[in-house]
Amino acid sequence: MIFQTIAIVLLFAAAVFYVGRLVYKSLYVKKGCGSNCKCGVDFSDIEPGKPRA
C-alpha cells in the first residue's frame, strides 16, 4: 500500500513539474521569433523609393 502511495505522489510531482515548466516557457519566451525575419526592426525612418518596372 505504501509503494502505491509513493508512486502516485512521484507521478503527481512529475506532472506538476512538467506543467509548471510549460507555463514558465510560454510566459517568459526569448526575444524575437528565433529566425532571421527582422520582425523587431524599426523601418519608420526609411523613405520608400521608386517602384521598379
Image: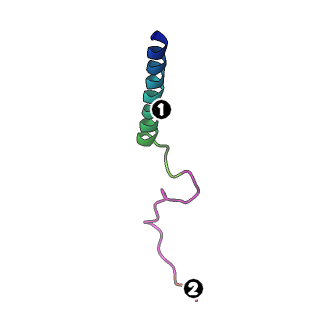
User: Does 13 appear above or below 32?
Assistant: above
Residue occupying image coordinates x 47% and y 16%: 4
Q: Which mark is residue 5?
A: none
Indicate the quadrant containing the C terminus: top left, top right, bottom left or bottom right: bottom right
Residue 31 position, x and y percent, is 49, 46
The residue sitting at the front extreme is 1
Residue topped by disc 1: 18
Q: Nearer the viewer, residue 38 or 13?
A: 13
Residue occupying image coordinates x 49% and y 59%: 39
Which residue type carries mark 2? Arg
Which residue type carries mark 1? Tyr
| The stretch drawn in magenta includes residue 10 | no
Residue occupying image coordinates x 43% and y 34%: 19
- Label 1: which secondary element: helix
Q: Residues within 10 Å of mark 2 (few under 14, many from 20)?
A: few
The residue sitting at the bottom extreme is 53
Q: Which mark is residue 52?
A: 2
What coloring was used for the rendering?
rainbow
| The stretch drawn in magenta includes residue 35 | yes
**Which one is in front in this view, the residue at disc 2 or the one at disc 1?**
1
Q: Nearer the viewer, residue 24 or 8?
A: 8
Residue occupying image coordinates x 41% and y 37%: 23
- Label 2: which secondary element: loop
- The residues colored magenta run 34-49
Dominant secondary structure, magenta = loop
Q: Rounded to the nearest whole Å, what is the CA distance between mark 2 and mark 1?
A: 53 Å
User: Does 36 appear above or below 53?
Assistant: above
Residue 41 position, x and y percent, is 49, 59
